[in-house]
Image: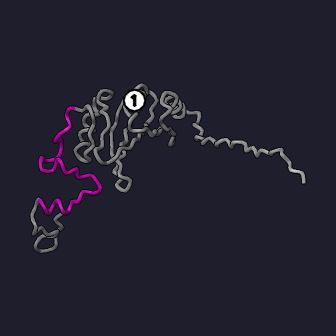
Amino acid sequence: MAVNDNKVENKVEPVEKAEEKKPELPNTKEGRLVKELLEKAPYAEGSVRREKRIEFKVPAERIHEFLELASERFEMLMQISVVDWLKENQFELVYQLWSVSESVHAFVRTRVPRENAEVPTAMDIWPVAETYEREAHEFFGINFKGNPRLGPFILEPREYEKHPLRKDFNTLSYVKTIYGDDFDRYDESKTNYVI
């Protein structure tokens, strides 16, 4: 009985990973703005939402760098808002920018953990950021590193550390603590709603 000493090697050709296809950017001023920024900031994701509206997602550790790049084309910071993703244990900060020269509105989104939430200030880029950062700090407890004016701003001192816009803030419990145990949601006649 002859034994074949020739070994047959099963060569498995490596399957190239299918590159994730990024959506095509339209050949519009919005598309060109997104493309221009993504070339300088490949760590970000960008898209055109519709005419005059674009959006970026940026890792929190690169947000200041990205905002500096964006400020070359977006002269105005219109607002910093916060979304509390309680189940995901994250805050999403949304920087809304406006390009005066292009008439385009940009949303720049980043996420940070709810515990000890911290991002760098944008005051050195747009001084108006101070007001929005103070508000986000007071209502959500986010620390903006480098902002020297974080502290009581809108709320009374007894409310300052409570962060009342967090989704896990118990408004009814807070009101009962402030106004007493015999707090009732209705007045004596039960006709007028108190809260």
Q: Is residue 173 left or right of residue 56?
A: left
For label 1, the residue is 65
Q: Position of residue 155 (x, y in %)?
A: 16, 47
Mark 1: amino acid: Glu
Who's the residue at 80% across and 45% down the image? Answer: 7
What is the residue that sits farthest to the bottom in this orientation? 189
Q: Position of residue 134 (x, y in %)?
A: 23, 39
Chain part drawn in magenta = 148-177
The prevailing secondary structure element of the residues shown in magenta is loop
Of 17 and 78, nearer the camera is 17
As displayed, is residue 67 above or below residue 8?
above
Who's the residue at 62% across and 41% down the image? Answer: 19
Q: Is residue 74 visible?
A: no
Q: Is residue 123 left or right of residue 105?
A: left
Disc 1 secondary structure class: helix
Rendered image quadrant of residue 149: top left
Q: Position of residue 59 (x, y in %)?
A: 42, 38
Who's the residue at 30% across and 43% down the image? Answer: 117
Report the number of numbered marks. 1
Q: Position of residue 194 (x, y in %)?
A: 16, 65
What is the residue that sits farthest to the top in this orientation? 72
For disc 1, the neighbor class at 10 Å (few under 14, some 14 to 19, many from 20) is some
